[in-house]
Amino acid sequence: MDLLLSGGPVLVAILLLSLYGLYVFLVRLIKLNKEPVDSDRLMVRVNAAIKERNLEMALAACENHGGPVARVLKGALMRLPYGRSAVESAFEEATLEEEQQLTRGLRPLATIAQVAPLLGLLGTVTGMIIAFAEISRLGAGNPAALADGIGQALVTTAAGLIVAIPTLIGHSYLTSRVDHVLLEIERRREELMGGVVEVVAARRDSGRVRADERYEPVKAS
C-alpha cells in the first residue's frame, strides 16, 4: 500500500493498464487456442468432395472442422457454382474478414506497450517537480521531505517498464500466431484453387463445360 501511495495517481493508471493488457492477452490467447489451425484432414475431405462435385459434403466438412481456415474455405466454396473468379473473390473477402477478427486486440496491446513507459516518465517528471517544490519550501537539509517526490519518480518509471516489457512480448507472440494462421489460409487457398482448376480442366477436356466454365455441383439425393 505504501508503494502504491508513493507512486501516486500515475502508478494507479499504469496498474489499470496492466490489468487491461493482461485481460486482452488472455482473451486472445484462449480464442486462438480454441480454434484449430491444422487443416490437412480438412483439405483431404474438401478436395475429395470437389472432385465428386459434392458441394454439400465440402461445406459440411468445413462446418464440422471449424476454425479460421475452415471458415474462409466455406465462404469461398459457397461461391463455387459461379466459377473460379467468384471463388477467388469470395476467398479474398473471407480472408480479410477473418484477419480482422484475428488481429482484434493486438492494437490495444501495442498501445499499452507504448503508453506505459510514457506514463512512467510522466510520473518521474511529476515526482521530481514535487521533490524540487519541497526543496524550495523546506530547504535541502531535510531529506525526509524529498522522499515522496523521489519515491514517485522511481516507482512509476520502474512500473512503466515492468508493464511495457511483458506486454510487448505478449503482443509479439500473438502476432506470430496470427501470422501463422494467415499463412495457413493462403496455403490452403492455393490448394483449393488448384483443385477447382483441375476439376474444371478435366470437365473441359471431356467436352462437358465451356471455356468460361461454371461449376455445377451434384445435388445430394
Image (cartoon, helix red, strand yellow):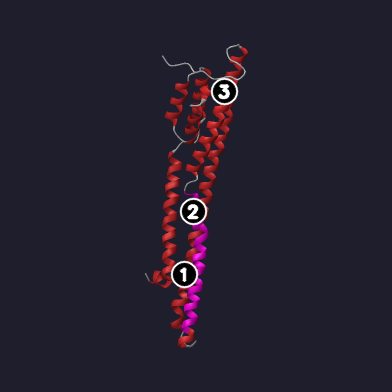
For label 3, the SS is helix
Can you say which quadrant of the picture contains the C terminus?
top left
Quarter holding the N terminus is bottom left
Q: Residue at x 55, y 23 (%)?
A: 83
Mark number for residue 196? 3
Q: Earlier in the sequence, mark 3 or mark 1?
A: 1
Q: CA distance from mark 1 to mark 2?
A: 22 Å
Foreground label between 1 and 2: 2
What is the secondary structure assignment of the residue under circle 2? helix
Callout 1 amino acid: Val
Q: Amino acid at mark 2?
A: Leu
Residue 139: in magenta span:
no
Q: Which comes sooner in the sequence, label 1 or label 2?
A: 2
Q: Which mark is residue 109?
A: 2
- Residue at image location 43% in from the left, 54% down from the top: 22
Task: Check if mark 3's residue and mark 2's residue have beta carbons within 8 Å.
Answer: no
Along the viewing direction, whichever of 83 and 37 lies nearer the viewer = 83
Q: Is residue 31 left or right of residue 193?
A: left
Question: Closest to the observer: 108 or 215?
Answer: 215
